[in-house]
Amino acid sequence: MNKKPYVIAFANQKGGVGKTTSAINIASCIAESGYKVLMLDCDPQGNTTSGLGINKKGIKHTMYEVLVDGASPEQCIVETKFQNLSLVPSTINLAGAEFDLISEDRKNRKICDFADKLDGKFEYIIIDCPPSLGILTVNALSAASGVIIPMQCEYYALEGLSQLMISIKKVKERYNPSLCITGILITMFNGRLNLSSQVLAEIKKYYCDKLFSTTIPRNVTLSEAPGFGEPINYHDKYSKGCAAYKAVAEEVISRTLG
């Protein structure tokens, strides 16, 4: 029997926290380490798709077809130009999936069904979730082995984190008893700001065992890379942002397969 991949959902109900950037760069750094990685772009904005240099025009099979039509891996997996990294892309059509799935009996198990068809081809599946807790995110969490929560050190961060933890707990109780928190990732961190340091200290007080030991700094090249359709380890492998994401990727591998 083929070994099942380790499925990681990147989730946060708040947008603009570096969720997609973190999903792309951690997936790419894990893939560069020699693991076969499949990304699922479950956000209708399709930023993961464009961030990996995939042209959305002319794509016939996307996450929409996976969720609504039960498309097979052979139909919808796209090889990227990056080592060991594949993708099921997304377009704005995915926004209609929540409505189309509303009356389906197994509407929250569609990604689980898709993952079962992969026949051990991948060691990791990385899912970029939309910034909301609808059917798309519940699908991802139902299929996930673990969740990575990217978040900024800002005023409302702890409140949002506690709300997300409640949502994850509900999915765990109803659909996926084995779901766990892989880690909390601090993004866009500026240690020179008192507020950032204060919020980080507060997060450590409650979630010390969940925090990744590396924080992601504010970094110009991290902001530039998506415009070139490249993960940071290809766009600027000598940048501080790349060093940080490589360190987090190593920690992810250690926490999941170690």
Image: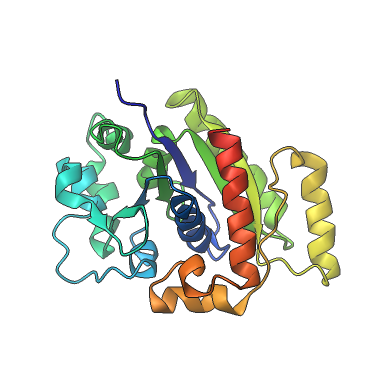
Of all residues, the one furthest to the front in this rendering is 34
Q: Position of residue 11 (x, y in %)?
A: 51, 49
Q: Position of residue 253 (x, y in %)?
A: 55, 41
Is 119 placed left or right of 167 in the picture? Answer: left
Q: Nearer the viewer, residue 89 or 152?
A: 89
Q: Nearer the viewer, residue 206 or 71?
A: 71
Dividing the image into 4 quarters, which one contains the C terminus?
top right
Is 146 placed left or right of 218 in the picture? Answer: left
**Residue at figure coordinates x 30%, y 61% from the top left:** 80
Q: Position of residue 165 (x, y in %)?
A: 61, 39
Is 57 placed left or right of 242 in the picture? Answer: left
Tell me if residue 122 comes above or below residue 172 in the rendering: below
Of all residues, the one furthest to the top in this rendering is 1
**Residue at figure coordinates x 70%, y 58% from the top left:** 215
Tell me if residue 57 comes above or below residue 256 in the rendering: below
Dividing the image into 4 quarters, which one contains the N terminus?
top left
Is 211 placed left or right of 62 in the picture? Answer: right
Res. 156 image quadrant: bottom right
Tell me if residue 33 comes above or below residue 24 in the rendering: above
Tell me if residue 185 comes above or below residue 173 in the rendering: below
Q: Nearer the viewer, residue 83 or 251?
A: 83
Q: Position of residue 164 (x, y in %)?
A: 58, 44
